[in-house]
């Protein structure tokens, strides 16, 4: 475990009606905002209306880009960037789940670098300056509101992949009321995504005493909401706020450590089969937990409400059912997941144990036997 410190520069303001209450905080970022959302959910949960009202109150102009798809593509980023330049925007607001918030960061980067083409998004070592970003989460999984990460889908690379830039939001506004409009599938998939962040930051070669403290607190919070994810308790305002807190804590934890093998394995499953992100990540979690130090595994399971790896695997499958995929197609995809990650030594080094292709294959296939 590393002994270094703590850095998370995003300012986070939480609470009821946070977007309207803290509208003045956005005024400092510019005079015209690009509001980045998905096609429907930002309207359904009310966040888009709240943002418009907040910006109207402070006299800030705005326009909207609402074509962000799940697992946003490089092409979408460039389309939004070009629209933003036409509109003369000087800061970006990402509102929704991980896709709009990740997209907002990448769009902000490319607005600043208006003379660059799409290849710039994956140019390691390049200038990572961007126009200011505000993030407003409406789901309980991504943690993108407190991380520097932007994950995009690339047809050129044939996978999902983080861009190599540190893009922390300047401001994040968190209000549990938006989660009240999430459907059961979204609630469960994003809820288990948050747990994956907590597990992968806790069982990580870059973990620090501080990051582990945050992850442990997040797991305790997450545990209290397991009955909601299991459908044994209705989602109410208190549990919505709590689930958003667990997601935020997971984001803060991975902001320090990065994610590990389950995330690396998941990208081919999402890109090739369209499996939602949280669902895809936790598909590989059973095998990852079993590969970890037994004491670390037992501690993580206990804090998050599970008695064993097997129980975790069963509850994950109960909450997050994989699409009906022919066995041969699934096995071919799992083999691709293994091969992709074996070729990524930086991601493999995030595991606090020795990783080889045989172990990756074991982790990839373990969930099929739970």
Image: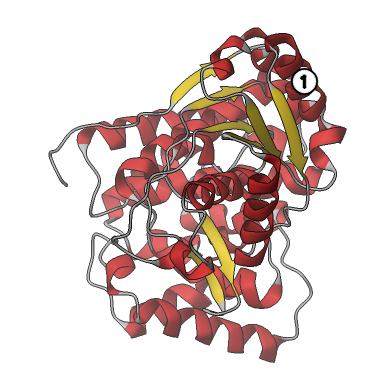
Taking 230 as reference, is 115 above or below it?
below
Q: Which quadrant holds the C terminus?
A: bottom right
Task: Name the side, left or right, on which 41 lies relative to 8.
Answer: right
Residue occupying the point 55% across, 74% down: 159
Task: Name the side, left or right, on which 292 lies relative to 282.
Answer: left
Q: Quadrant of residue 339?
A: bottom left
Q: Position of residue 275 (x, y in %)?
A: 68, 66
Residue occupying the point 40% across, 76% down: 341
Q: Position of residue 260 (x, y in %)?
A: 37, 59
Check disc 1: other Cα within 10 Å, few if <14, some if 14-19, many if 20+: some
- Which residue bears the numbered disc 1? 50
In front: 138, or 323? Answer: 138
Q: Is residue 63 visible?
A: yes
Outermost residue toward the left in this view: 3
Residue occupying the point 42% across, 28% down: 10
Q: Position of residue 226 (x, y in %)?
A: 63, 36
Q: Is residue 370 visible?
A: no
Taking 5 as reference, is 177 above or below it?
above
Q: Position of residue 323 (x, y in %)?
A: 76, 69
In front: 315, or 273? Answer: 273
In front: 138, or 47? Answer: 47
Residue occupying the point 18% across, 33% down: 5
Task: Name the side, left or right, on which 119 lies relative to 314.
Answer: left
């Amino acid at each position: 475990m590393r002994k270094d410190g703590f850095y998370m520069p995003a300012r986070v303001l939480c609470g009821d009606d946070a977007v309207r209450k803290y509208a003045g905080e956005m005024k400092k970022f510019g005079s015209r905002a690009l509001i980045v959302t998905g096609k429907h959910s930002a309207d359904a949960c009310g966040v888009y209306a709240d943002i418009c009202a907040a910006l109207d109150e402070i006299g800030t102009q705005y326009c909207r880009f609402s074509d962000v798809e799940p697992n946003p593509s490089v092409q979408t980023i460039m389309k939004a960037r070009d629209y933003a330049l036409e509109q003369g925007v000087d800061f970006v607001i990402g509102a929704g789940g991980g896709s709009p918030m990740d997209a907002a960061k990448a769009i902000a980067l490319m607005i600043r670098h208006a003379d660059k083409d799409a290849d710039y998004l994956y140019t390691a070592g390049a200038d990572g300056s961007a126009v200011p970003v505000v993030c407003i989460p409406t789901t309980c999984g991504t943690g993108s509101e407190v991380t520097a990460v932007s994950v995009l889908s690339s047809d050129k690379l044939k996978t999902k992949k983080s861009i190599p830039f540190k893009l922390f939001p300047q401001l994040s506004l968190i209000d549990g009321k938006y989660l009240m409009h999430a459907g059961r599938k979204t609630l469960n998939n994003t809820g288990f995504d948050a747990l994956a962040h907590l597990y992968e930051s806790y069982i990580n070669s870059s973990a620090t005493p501080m990051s582990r403290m945050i992850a442990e607190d997040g797991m305790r919070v997450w545990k209290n909401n397991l009955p909601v994810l299991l459908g044994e308790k209705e989602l109410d305002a208190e549990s919505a706020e709590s689930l958003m807190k667990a997601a935020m804590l997971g984001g803060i934890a991975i902001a320090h450590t990065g994610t590990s093998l389950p995330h690396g394995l998941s990208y081919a499953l999402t890109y090739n089969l369209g499996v939602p992100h949280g669902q895809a990540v936790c598909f590989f979690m059973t095998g990852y937990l079993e590969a970890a130090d037994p004491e670390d595994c037992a501690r993580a399971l206990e804090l998050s409400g599970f008695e064993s790896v097997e129980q975790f695997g069963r509850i994950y499958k109960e909450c997050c059912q994989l699409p009906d995929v022919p066995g041969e197609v699934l096995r071919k995809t799992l083999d691709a997941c293994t091969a992709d990650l074996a070729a990524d030594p930086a991601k493999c080094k995030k595991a606090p144990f020795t990783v080889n292709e045989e172990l990756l294959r074991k982790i990839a296939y373990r969930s099929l036997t739970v």
